[in-house]
Image: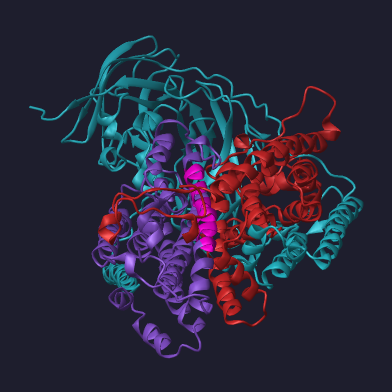
Amino acid sequence: MKLKNTLKCLKQGLALSLMVIVTALSISEAAFAHGERNQEPFLRTRTLHWYDMKYTVENDGAVAINDIVTITGKFRMFERWPSQIPEPERMYLNVNSNGSTFVKLESWVNGKPAIQSMIGELGRDYEFKIVLKARWEGRWHVHPMINVLDTGGLAGPGIWINVTGDHNDFKMAGTTLEGDVFENLSTYGMAQVYGWHIFWAVLGLFWLLYWITKPTLMPRWLMVKSGEYENTLITRTDTKVGVVMLVLVVGFVVGGGLYTTSKHPRTIPLQAGVAHINPLPVAPSIKVDVVKGNYYVPGRTVITEVVITNTTDLPIQLGEYTAANIRFIEHSVIDFDEVSQTTPAELLAQSSLKLSDNSPLNPGESRQVTIEASDAAWELERLTSLMNDPDNTLGALLFFYDSAGNRYITELFSGMVPVFDPT
Amino acid sequence: MTTTAQALGDTSTYAKSENQKGDEVSSFFSARGAVIGVASVLALAVLARWYQGWASWDYGTESTSPEFSFYWMNLFYAQLILAATAFVAGIAYMWFTRDKDLTKITSKVELRRYSTFISMLVVYAFAFVFAGSFFAEQDAAWHQVVMRDTSFTPSHIVLFYGFFPLFIILGFTTYTYAMTRLPLYAKGVSIPLVLGTLGPMMVLPNVGYNEWGHAFWFMEEYFTAPLHWGFVVFGWSIMGLGGILVQLMSRISILMSDVFLPSPEPKTTAYTS
Amino acid sequence: MALEPSQERVLQELLKPNSQMSRFSRKLDYFIIAIVMFAVMGAFHIHFMLTGGDWDFWVDWKDRQFWVTVTPIVLMIVIAAFQAIFYQHFRLPIGATLCGILLILGEWLNRYFGFYLWSHFPMSLVWPALVIPMCLWLDLVLHLSRSFILTAIIGALGFALMFPASNWAILAAFRVPIEVQGTLLSMADYIGFTFSRTATPEYLRIIERGTLRTFGGESTIIAAFFSGFVCMIMYAIWWNIGNYIAQLGWTNNRLKSFMGFKKDDNVTVAEGLGGKL
C-alpha cells in the first residue's frame, strides 16, 4: 500500500507542479475556435458557404445576462457536395456557443420557423435569423451552425462575445397552452423531479438498509449453502415488510400517475415533424470555368486560373472570394474598411484579392484570368492540410458586382496542386 | 511471512495481535489502508475535474492551438509516462516481494492477507467508479457542446488516459498481490478474479475501436452508438467480482474456523503437506 | 450443498450475537459492501449510459416509443445478473434496488458536475429518469414469490410497465403544449430547442415519428408491453449469466512454483474451492 500511495502522491505532485508552471507562464490569448480548423478542407469548403453575416453585437463586444443577440445571414449549400458524405436529407439550424451559454429564443430560415429539422437542397441559398439570449457569464465564441444528418456540425463564422453578470439571474418566462405561467425554463418542472427522486431514493434506501443492517454476507452465505435455514434467511417479518413495500410501491406509482394526469389533462407527444422550407429563388450568376488550381506553399497563396464569361447585361468585376468562412476582398471593388468593421480579423484576409486583370468585363465577353488569394489564414486555418487528404479539392464562392451594384454569386470548384518551390 | 507483513506496512497490527490473543478481530480489516487509498483516488479525481473546469473552455476546444498542446497534450504525455511507470512498478513490487513459500503460512496470516486483499479491491472498485461512471458520462456532456477535432480531447485525456490506466494499474497490482500472497490464487488462476480485476483492462484497447468509429463511421454524437458498445461488454467483466465474492466466502469461512475457534484436534496450518 | 464441518462450526458461532466471529463477519460485510457498491455503480452506469444514455440524458428524447421500449430492456441486463448473485448465494432480494440507487446516484452526480457545471445545460433538460420504483418491484416480486420463473414472468413484465407509469409523475409537465413561433411544441421540445446541443440536433433524436396505424393514443402501452416481453427473456438470460459468473472456477497457474507450490498442488474443495477446477 505504501508504494501505491507514494506513486499516487508522486502523480499528484507532478500534476500540481505542471499546474504551477502553467499559471506562472503568461500565455497570450489567441482567438482560437471550436475545432472546426481540424475538419477536413473538403468538408469546410464544399458544404456550406456563409455570407452576409450580421451580428447585433460587435466582435469581442460585451452583453449582460438576459441581453438579446441576433445573428442573421445567408448560406449556400454547395452544389458539388462532397460524395464522401450523404446529401443533406435532414439538416438543422443550430448555434454553437460553448454549451448553453446562449439560449435560442427564435430561429428562422427564409422567414419560416426552423424549430424542427428541414431538408436541404444543393446549389441553393437560404437566409436565416437566430435570436439568442445570454445565459452564462464568460467569454464565448458564438457560431451559427448547420447540423447535417450523418455529417455532423458545419460551423459558420463565429464571433467572441463577453457575457457579464451571474447565470443565476437568467430568466426565461413563458405561458403554456394550458395557461400555466412559468418563470424560468431552465428550472421548469424540477420541483416534481427532485421531489419524486428523493421520495423513491428514500424508499429504495430503506429496503437496502433493512437487509444490510443485519448480518449480511458470511452467515447468510453459510445458511444458503447449508440448505437448512430458509426460514431464518427470510423470516415472517421479512415477508410482511415485503408485502407492505409492494403495496407502497404500486400505490405510489399508480396514485402518482393518476394525480399527475388530473393535474395535466392535456398533454401531447414529442413533436417530430419536418419543417418544409423552400430555398431562396435561383438568382442569375456568372459563368466561371476553371482551368487549373495551385497552392503556392511558401507564399500561402491559392492561385486559380479561370475563364470568366459575363452572362449579364452590365459590365462586371470580381469583388470577393470566400472559402471556409475566410473572406478575400478585392480592395478596389469593395470598401475594405467597411468589411473589416463587421468581420472578425481572423476571418478576413488583410491583403487584397489579386486578379491578373480585373477591369470591368463587358456583357457577353469572356476572359482568362488568374485569381490570387493570399493570406496566412490558409495555414492557420489548416486549409492547406488538404495535401494530407484523400480528396484534394477546394470549393469557394465568387462574388461579382455589376456597374449598377447588383451582386452575382458563382461557385468555384477546383483541384489543388501544391507548388513547393516556385522558381 | 512477517517480511511480507512488514512490506505491506501492517507490522504494528501484526505484532499487537500476536501479543493480545484475547481480541483477534481488531487485527483484521484495518480501515486505514482502504481509507487512504480511497481518499487518494478521490483527491486525484477532484484535481482532474478542477483542471478540466479550469482549462477546458479556455484552452481545450481547438486542438491545433499552441495552448492546447501546452495545457492538454503535456498532461497527456505526463500521464502516459506516469501510468506506464506505475503499472510496471506495481506489478514488479508485488512480484519481487512475493512470499516464496506459501505452503507454510498460518491461517491467521492468510486471513490477514485476505483483509489486505479486500481493502485493495475497495480502492480498485472505487477507481472504477470514476472510469465507468463519473468521467465516462461527463464525456457525453463535453462532446455535446464542442466540435470533436481530435482523439485527445480534454474529456478523453482525463478519462481514457488518466482514470482508465489508474483502475487498470490498481487491478493488476491487486491481482499480483493475490497471486503472490494468497495460497489459493497462487495454486490456481481464478477465472472470476481475472475477469473482475484484469478483464476491464480491455476498455483501454477498445479506445481504438471508439476512435475508429468516430473518425470513419459515425459523424454524429450518439452516445448509444455501436461504436461505444465495446466499453459496455468489457465493463460487464467487472461482474466477475460476483464470482470472487463467492470464492472469498468459501475460503474465509474455513480460515475463520481455524483462527477463531478452539480446534477440536491439534491445530495444523492449512497447507502443511 | 452441504457445509464442510469447519464451516458448520463457523455458522453456529456466527448465529451467536456479539461473538468474536460475528464482529469479524460484520467487518467483512462493511468492506465487501463498499466493493459491491463501487463496482456496481461503475459497471451499471457505463453499461446504461452507452446503451440507453441518450434517452436518459435529454428530456426531448423521452418519447412514447423508443425510450419506453429501450430503457427497461437495457436496465434488465445487469440488474438480473446482480439479482441472481445476491439472491442465489445470500438470499438477499436487493440486487435490483442496489443497481437502481447507485445508477441514479452516478447520474445525478454527473448531470450536476458534467452537464450543468461543465457544459452549462439546465437541469430541466438533463434530469435522469426514475428507475428505483421498477427495481423495487422486481426485488419485491422475487422476495415474495421466491421464484426465478415467477419473477421472470410477473416481475420483468411489471418492471417494464412500471417504467413509464412511475415516470409519468415527473414527465407529464414536460408534455404540456406550448406555442413557439407559431409552432406547436411540447415543453420538452421547447427546452431542447432553447438550450441547444451542438452535437445532438433535433433530427438525431430516436423518437416516435408517428405510426401507420391509429395507435397514436396507445403508443406508450404498446411500447411498454413489448419492452416487458423482451425484459422477460432478458431476465431469464441474464439471471443465468449471473449464476454462471458466480460459480466460475479455476485453471492451473503455471507460476505457482515461484510461490513454493509443487506442480500437482491444486485448489481443493476442503480449502474452499468455490467453483469448479
Decide: is B204 above or below A153.
below
Which chain corresponds to the colour purple? B
Task: Residue B184: name its quadrant.
Answer: bottom left
Task: Residue A91: name its quadrant.
Answer: top right
Q: Nearer the viewer, residue B33 or B138?
A: B33
**In x, y percent, where is residue A127?**
57, 33
Give the tally of numbered discs.
0
- Indicate whether residue A40 is drawn in magenta: no
Q: Is residue B59 visible?
A: no
Which chain corresponds to the colour cyan? A
**Residue reaching furthest top?**
A364
**Residue reaching furthest front?**
B265
Query: Which of the image's four quarters has the N terminus of chain B?
Result: bottom left
**In x, y percent, where is residue A66?**
62, 60
Q: Which residues are magenta?
A: B231-250
**In x, y percent, where is residue C168?**
80, 50
Secondary structure mostly taken by the magenta-highlighted segment of the chain: helix
Decide: is C159 above or below B124.
above
Which residue is located at x 45 percent, y 73 percent?
B34
Which residue is located at x 47 percent, y 51 percent?
B192
**In x, y percent, where is residue B101?**
28, 65
Decide: is B35 above or below C247.
below
Q: Is residue B144 left or right of residue A394?
A: right
Colouring mode (rainbow / by chain / secondary structure / one colour)? by chain
Q: Nearer the viewer, residue A126 or C247?
A: C247
Q: Is residue B247 visible?
A: yes
- Indicate whether residue B236 is drawn in magenta: yes
Q: Is residue A377 left or right of residue A258?
A: left
**Residue reaching furthest left?**
A423
| Chain C, chosen colour in render | red
Which residue is located at x 38 percent, y 56 percent?
B168
